[in-house]
């Protein structure tokens, strides 16, 4: 067989093999067996040196054509196969976006936080600012600046956890009264703020007491602020949280930082005022303390009591949550039982 026939045979065989290759590896194998160093076409090209000089350009040109044809066929088949592989992959990995998804459990704020959020919304609506203080407080702000000097007997009611001899876990959110009054410029208008947060006491835990609980402090100081403003504000709070069917009552009380002072009760949720174990047969549950800011407290925070005055209150959102949802033991809120907590979801 002459070289030309041999080249023609190789072209036919090669094109056939390339067309029959069903994956890229096989196409590559054909390339190596034909065009590689030891390939059959390469062997033919090597044999050209034995040809007559006038034959060489003719056969050489032909051989180049065969090589180009084979190379083009290899590239085309490789591209075809790569495309087939990609299509098969796309087919196999098809996503049905209309299938229902896996439900993700949705969290919610703790029930006491929900009460705090509701109070914040209400007070922001009445033009108050929210001021969050630190749970670790200086003794001087927790007691002294609130008219509770060292050795004052009322300190016993709020014994707490001391971090150092002069730094403690705050027993109330009232320290924020002094901190905010010190910063406020009263010539620019009244100070109206609430301050929510955790407080700590050495209280014995029982159905209505916990050693760690929350308070929301309220303070309004300006010109011509009266006790009627305090009562109206607290009535608004009670109405907003509990609806119109629960009453509030103000009882005279004592706090060193307010004068006069009141304790505010709300009708017992359980017996609706008849008297039961929850309300210790009084028909009422105490939810907050309040009063008119004591002149000494104003003075110690740099506010002139002759010019300015105001009211303050400190309420317990944990007790509010008990009242609102009829929970009989405050400790249930702190057990982190999700079955219990998910019952209360204001936002649905
Ligand atoms: C105070 O802590 C005052 N700082 C409140 C105050 C502020 C009075 C401003 C005047 C002016 P009292 O100790 O009564 O007061 O606590 C206030 C509220 O916190 C109570 O009415 C009650 O709702 C809640 N509270 C008190 N002790 C506990 C406790 N151990 N567990 C749960 N809630 C409590």
Image (cartoon, helix red, strand yellow):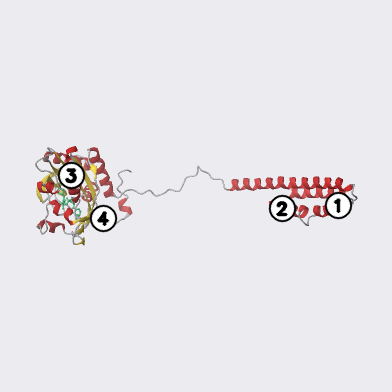
Per the image, the residue denoted by label 4 is: 332
Q: Are marks 4 and 1 in contact (CB under 8 Å)?
A: no
Badge 2 or badge 3: first in the primary sequence: 2
Q: Position of residue 327 (x, y in %)?
A: 24, 51
Badge 2 or badge 1: first in the primary sequence: 2
Q: Mark 3 packing: few (<14 Cα in 10 Å), some, or many (20+)?
A: many
Residue at the spot x=83%, y=54% of the render? 46
Q: Nearer the viewer, mark 4 or mark 2?
A: 2
Per the image, the residue denoted by label 1 is: 48
Residue 137 is drawn in which quadrant? bottom left
Badge 4 or badge 2: first in the primary sequence: 2
Residue at the spot x=59%, y=46% of the render? 90
- The quadrant in which the C terminus is found is top left
The residue nearer to you, when weighing 144 against 69, is 144
Instruction: Answer with left or right where residue 231 lies relative to residue 74.
Output: left
Q: CA distance from mark 4 to mark 1?
A: 98 Å
Above or below, 41 relative to 223: below
Q: What is the secondary structure assignment of the residue under circle 1?
A: helix
Mark 1 C-beta closer than 8 Å to ligand 1: no
Q: Are marks 4 and 2 in contact (CB under 8 Å)?
A: no
Per the image, the residue denoted by label 2 is: 28
Q: Nearer the viewer, mark 2 or mark 1?
A: 1
Q: Nearer the viewer, mark 3 or mark 4?
A: 3
Q: Nearer the viewer, mark 1 or mark 3?
A: 1
Q: Mark 1 packing: few (<14 Cα in 10 Å), some, or many (20+)?
A: some
Mark 3 C-beta closer than 8 Å to ligand 1: yes
Per the image, the residue denoted by label 3 is: 219
């Amino acid at each position: 067989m002459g070289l030309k026939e041999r080249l023609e045979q190789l072209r036919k065989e090669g094109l056939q093999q390339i067309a029959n290759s069903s994956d890229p590896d096989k196409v590559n194998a054909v390339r190596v067996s034909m065009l590689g160093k030891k390939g059959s076409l390469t062997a033919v090209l090597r044999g050209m040196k034995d040809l007559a000089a006038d034959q060489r350009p003719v056969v050489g040109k032909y051989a180049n054509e065969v090589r180009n044809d084979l190379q083009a066929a290899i590239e085309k088949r490789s591209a075809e196969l790569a495309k087939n592989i990609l299509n098969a992959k796309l087919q196999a990995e098809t996503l049905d976006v209309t299938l229902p998804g896996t439900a993700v459990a949705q969290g919610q704020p703790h029930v006491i936080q929900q009460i705090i959020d509701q109070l914040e919304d209400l007070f922001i609506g009445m033009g108050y600012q929210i001021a969050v203080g630190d749970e670790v407080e200086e003794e001087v702000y927790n007691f002294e600046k609130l008219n509770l000097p060292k050795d004052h007997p009322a300190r016993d009611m709020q014994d707490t956890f001391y971090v150092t001899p002069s730094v403690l876990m705050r027993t109330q959110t009232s320290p924020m009264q002094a901190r905010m009054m010190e910063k406020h410029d009263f010539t620019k208008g009244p100070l109206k703020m609430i301050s929510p947060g955790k407080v700590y006491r050495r209280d014995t835990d029982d159905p209505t007491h916990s050693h760690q609980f929350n308070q929301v402090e309220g303070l309004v100081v300006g010109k011509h602020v009266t006790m009627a403003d305090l009562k109206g504000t607290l009535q608004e709070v009670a109405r907003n949280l509990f609806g119109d069917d629960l009453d509030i009552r103000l009882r005279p009380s004592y706090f060193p930082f307010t004068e006069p002072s009141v304790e505010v009760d709300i009708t017992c949720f359980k017996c609706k005022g008849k008297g039961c174990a929850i309300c210790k047969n009084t028909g009422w549950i105490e939810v907050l303390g309040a009063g008119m800011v004591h002149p000494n407290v104003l003075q110690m925070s740099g506010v002139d009591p002759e010019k300015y005055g105001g009211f303050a209150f400190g309420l317990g959102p944990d007790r509010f949550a008990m009242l609102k949802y009829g929970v009989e033991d405050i400790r249930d809120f702190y057990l982190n039982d999700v079955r219990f907590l998910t019952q209360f979801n204001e936002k649905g």
